Amino acid sequence: MAKIKVGLAGIGNCASGFVQGLSYYKNPKNQKDSIGLRQTFLAGYHPKDIEVVAAFDVDARKIGKDLSAAIFSEPNNTLKFAEVPELGVSVHKGQVLDGLGSYLKDVIKVGASPAASASQVLKETDAEMLVSLLPGGAAKATQWYAKEALHAGCAFINVTPVRIASDSTWDEQFRNAKLPVVGDDLIDQIGATTLHKMLIKLLDEQGVRISETYQLDVGGGTESLDTLERSRDTKRIAKTKTIRTTLPYETSIVAGTTDYVDFLRNRRDSYLWIKGMYFGKAPMEMELRLCTVDGPNAGSVLLDVIRAVKVALERGESGAIQSISAFAFKHPPEIVSFRRAAQLFKKFLFEK
Ligand SMILES: NC(=O)c1ccc[n+]([C@@H]2O[C@H](COP(=O)([O-])OP(=O)(O)OC[C@H]3O[C@@H](n4cnc5c(N)ncnc54)[C@H](O)[C@@H]3O)[C@@H](O)[C@H]2O)c1
């Protein structure tokens, strides 16, 4: 099958996990078992059909390097699980704008070279879609890349919590340009939010009345540091909202990132607590800790999203694609239940 040509903006931990994954699942030995993939084939596409053709960052330690080396450059600190051969894709400097908040200014060393025209690079490399993997607080920079994608005739995948796919003005711009846009804020493969929703659903189906619940995270990647300063509130609202959709009644819910613990590196520890009542109003409580590594946690879902966006491009679909967004993102244009999102995605893939 023809390659799916992708551009990446933001070569941090998430990009590292994704690029390593492309190399890992290309290996015939790993292809055989495909452990770790949610879908080996999606719409006939295998992960090996995906090719990164363009990359952008602002850190001097990544700009000008081959992507295979940039993903392992500081301050990236995620798990190394694959050897990545030279890819022939050099990292270009993007516009900094609000890419770095004050907490990241000492951690990320901005390169002195002038910014490239991202749209020109995307056109020259025949990229079909651009994925934004910028820090969560980088609203203006994410919007700049969305505009560059529009200029280049690329679809846009917004992994960040910045509002793009769920914003009607962007939906309209992509619709007018006859290009798809999906987002916002990717759901992890084994994320605390999904686990929290599943547990709440299970308890609800068992007749438990949940009265209070929270989900708190600590992490040690640069994204956790940036979240602490700039997107804690946005994330908290989005996560709380999505968990609320699971229950048919109002209850006390708090879900959101809490703190940065540098020595955890790219590990994320999520604490879940649920309190409720069951038969005869007998009390129950549940406590759970989920430990994951952030970077690889986005890889499998992103592989599915890229292949689904390719399908949307082939069908000429445009604007915010609700089915893909609801299935794979925490803040789609319309938040629906987990089951409904899965139905919409299946319908998108098989019934059109
Ligand atoms: N599991 C996951 O990793 C996961 C899941 C869901 C959402 N996300 C979102 O993905 C995004 C990336 O997460 P991460 O952990 O890789 O973050 P990160 O901090 O490791 O990486 C961000 C990268 O963006 C670069 N950058 C900053 N400003 C830029 C600009 N203007 N142009 C180009 N590059 C710029 C930084 O130098 C850095 O390399 C975040 O918004 C996060 O919320 C990640």
Image: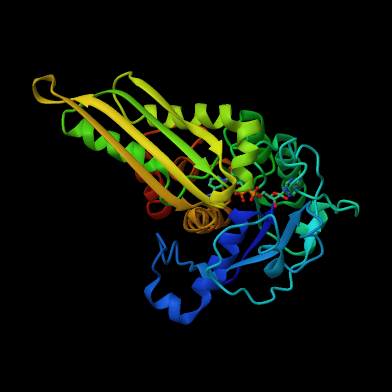
The answer to whether residue 251 is left or right of residue 57 is left
Nearer to me, 98 or 175: 98
Q: Position of residue 236 (x, y in %)?
A: 51, 29
Residue at the far bottom: name it.
29
Measured along the vertical axis of the image, is residue 65 above or below residue 86? Answer: above
Q: Nearer the viewer, residue 190 or 37?
A: 190
Vertical comparison of 174 with 229: above or below: below
Give residue 30's position: percent from left, percent from top.
Answer: 44, 76
- Residue drawn at x 70%, y 41% is 142
- Number of marks in the rendered image: 0
Query: Is 274 situated above or below 1?
Result: above
Residue drawn at x 77%, y 41% is 105
Whether residue 318 is visible to the viewer of this picture, yes or no, is no
Question: Which residue is farthest front?
Answer: 263
Picture coordinates of residue 284, whole percent (x, y): 20, 28
Query: Looking at this view, is 122 or 136 the one in front?
Result: 136
**Residue 76 on image: x %, y %:** 65, 56
**Residue at horizontal 75 percent and vertical 55 percent from the top:** 56
Q: Is residue 166 visible?
A: yes
Of residues 263 and 23, the one drawn nearer to the viewer in this rendering: 263
Q: Which quarter shows the N terminus? A: bottom right
Q: Which corner quadrant of the image does residue 227 belong to? A: top right
Residue shown at 82% from the left, 49% from the top? 110
Image quadrant assignment for residue 285: top left
